[in-house]
Image (cartoon, rainbow, N blue to C red):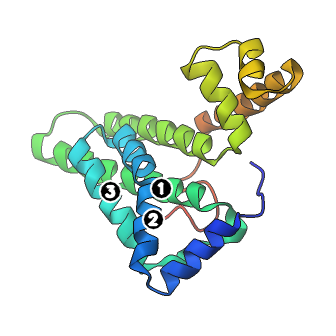
Amino acid sequence: MAMDTPPRWDRRMQQRLARGEAAALGELYDRFAALVHNLAHRVLDDDDAADQITREVFGYIWENPDAYDPKQGNMRAWIAKLTQSQAVHRLRQTEATAYAETGRGSVEELEQKVRRASVAARADYIVTSMPRPLRAALELAYFQRRDYRQTAADLGVTEDEARRRLRLGLQLLSSANTRHPEGGGPPGYGRAL
């Protein structure tokens, strides 16, 4: 993924959070709470757990605004990675506890479930981290079932450009299935909160 210069909004938001501006946290929450909740729900398949992850992620951001490194990418991608990491960590804890209490399932089944959730979360992270033109092309083609010609028309680009965006977006998504060590992704963004 290209590491574009982060928008000024990201840098200003980080500065406002570092100054302790509660309004900045509210603005950040309004902008990214749905993203955080949806990513957490995708991994945990539980609304209450996704709500808790959402609170934890924004609490972490409020307490550690300097943990965001603009050189590593935009704030949206950082927040998505924090969410993915925390949700996978929670899934591992929850499933291990359930396994220990019930004795049902095997360690291999637990790890397989965690791996599947990690791949799904990584795919979501990749999509949310994509530049907007790639993300828009994928959303049109796959969620709205547009072919590349319709995608090109909807985006106001040439058919060749639409195919290029779709191809690049799919190449980025294919990396979600590759094995990554726990906490793969941008350096420094892989630890649990």
Q: Residue furthest bottom?
A: 19
Up/down of 40 relative to 53, above or below: above
- Seen at 34% across and 41% down, the residue is 41
Tell me the quarter of the picture where residue 176 sits. top right
Q: Which mark is residue 53?
A: 3
Image coordinates of residue 40 in percent, x first then y, are 37, 47
Comparing marks 3 and 1, which lies closer to the viewer? 1
Amino acid type of the residue tagged 1 in the rendering: Arg
Amino acid type of the residue tagged 2 in the rendering: Glu
Q: Is residue 97 visible?
A: yes
Q: Are marks 1 and 2 in contact (CB under 8 Å)?
A: yes
Tell me the quarter of the picture where residue 115 sits. top left
Q: Secondary structure at mark 3?
A: helix
Mark 3 is surrounded, within 10 Å at the Cα level, by few (under 14), some (14 to 19) or many (20 or more) other residues, namely: many
Amino acid type of the residue tagged 3 in the rendering: Ile
CA gap, disc 1 and disc 2: 6 Å
Q: Which residue is mark 1?
A: 31
CA gap, disc 3 and disc 2: 18 Å
| Earlier-in-chain disc, 3 versus 1 | 1
Q: Is residue 193 visible?
A: no
Q: Which residue is mark 2?
A: 27
Of residues 117 and 61, the one nearer the viewer is 61
- Seen at 23% across and 33% down, the residue is 105
| Earlier-in-chain disc, 3 versus 2 | 2
Up/down of 14 relative to 110, above or below: below
Q: Which mark is residue 57?
A: none
Comparing marks 3 and 2, which lies closer to the viewer? 2
Of residues 149 and 2, the one nearer the viewer is 149
Q: Secondary structure at mark 1?
A: helix
How many numbered circles are shown? 3
- Seen at 25% across and 49% down, the residue is 49
